[in-house]
Amino acid sequence: MRRQVDYLIIGQGLAGSILSRELIKQGCSIQLIDNQKENASQIAAGLINPITGMRLVKNKELDILLPSAKQTYLQLGQFFQQDFYLEKPMLRVLRNTQELQKFKQRIQDSAYLDYLEPNLRPAPDSIIAPLGIIQQKQTGYLLTQKLLACLKSYFQKKNCYQAEQLDYQDLTINDNIQWQDITAKKIIFCEGYQAINNPWFKYLPFQLAKGEILTLTTAQTLLPELLNFGHWLIPLNKHQFRTGATFDNINLNTLTTQKGKNTLLKALTRVMPALNSATIDTQQANIRPTTLDKMPFIGQHPEHKNIMIFNGFGAKGSLQIPYYSKQFVQHLLTNAPIAPAVNCQRYR
């Protein structure tokens, strides 16, 4: 007997999970298909950092993205009775005089004062920072793996989750989408980096990047803040932390490497020498679905109106996905326009 749903969603990373949850909240029926392979969302740091890059740039859409992300993760936390988003200040090591000058420029701009403390801080004894440290505000990180596990259980209880590798050739595309015993009005691909093999969306200019992350334990007592020193450090407790991430756009695989480990350890101990005795608990690697213009791909295929994509969030997924999932759902339900900057039709 065939089952009918509104949306067939492919991929249970952060994008597919948050979008599926939003559709269910709006009364839509879904079937979520996931191959259960480790995806970038499960490994990602989940960092939310409003001011990024050497030029200390504030995201143009930050004032709508950040409140939406915080509200979404708070609501999910209340629903599952767990905390998923941990807000912590971030200490940023100034690495050169250009960054120092840019900081002095930014604190003269009122738009930055909600996100940057205006005064330089001296470096703690454990950190080498001759030019000083700035403190960034409204930063934090998402416990992505924990959230995805809770959402997977939620979808399973609603009988709308299926663990299976989807073969594109098994899809029948007519007025409706047919796959196995399911008929759907639309299919939405949230596959992460695997979209480069998607026959309908592989024309989009993804610029994939492999990243490696270490989890370590140290006898030293860690500072409670997040740390940004070109790479990042997230204290998980007083003695365990994660650090990352490398960037490799050539060797696009999910294998960990000695080179990646050495890169991270060298950067870490240059700033915090006492951590040279930390022991490595895990080393992980995955591929970020980054894009040519660093903006996600959202919307429908130029020829097939019932084939959609919600992908390409890269390292900013924790910040961007909650807001854009709400916007995309409104587009699906009311035909509200998709912002041109993220609409995949910009590469039609």
Image: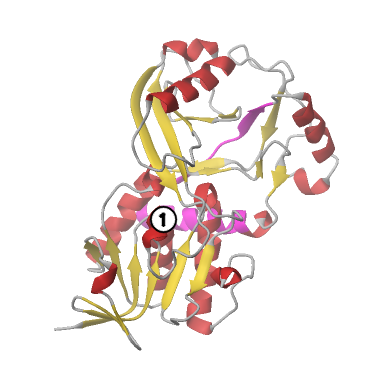
Residue to which mark 1 is pinned? 192
Name the side, left or right, on which 281 lies relative to 132. Answer: left
Q: Vertical placement of 33 versus 146: above or below?
A: below
Q: Where is residue 206 in the image (x, y as percent from the top left)?
A: 50, 56
Quarter of the rendering containing residue 172: bottom left
Which kind of residue does numbered mark 1 sit on? Gly
Task: Give the farthest residue toward the left.
Answer: 1
Name the side, left or right, on which 307 lies relative to 330. Answer: left
| Residue 91 lies within the magenta run | yes
Could one spot residue 254 in this view of the protein?
yes
Name the one closer to the observer, 114 or 168. 168
Q: Where is residue 326 in the image (x, y as percent from the top left)?
A: 52, 68
Q: Quadrant of the C terminus?
A: bottom right
Q: What stretch is highlighted in magenta?
A: 65-93
Q: Quadrant of the N terminus?
A: bottom left
**Secondary structure at numbered mark 1:** helix
- Is the image coloured rainbow, by chain, by secondary structure, or in one colour? secondary structure
| Residue 189 lies within the magenta run | no
Residue drawn at x 61%, y 33% is 90
Name the side, left or right, on which 27 lies relative to 126. Answer: left
Residue drawn at x 64%, y 60% is 64
Q: Vertical placement of 294 versus 306: above or below?
A: above
Residue drawn at x 47%, y 16% is 221
Mark 1 residue crowding within 10 angstroms, few (<14) / some (14–19) / many (20+): many
Name the side, left or right, on which 203 lies relative to 11. Answer: right
Name the one closer to the observer, 233 or 21. 233
Q: Position of residue 166 (x, y in %)?
A: 26, 65
Could one spot residue 82 in this view of the protein?
no
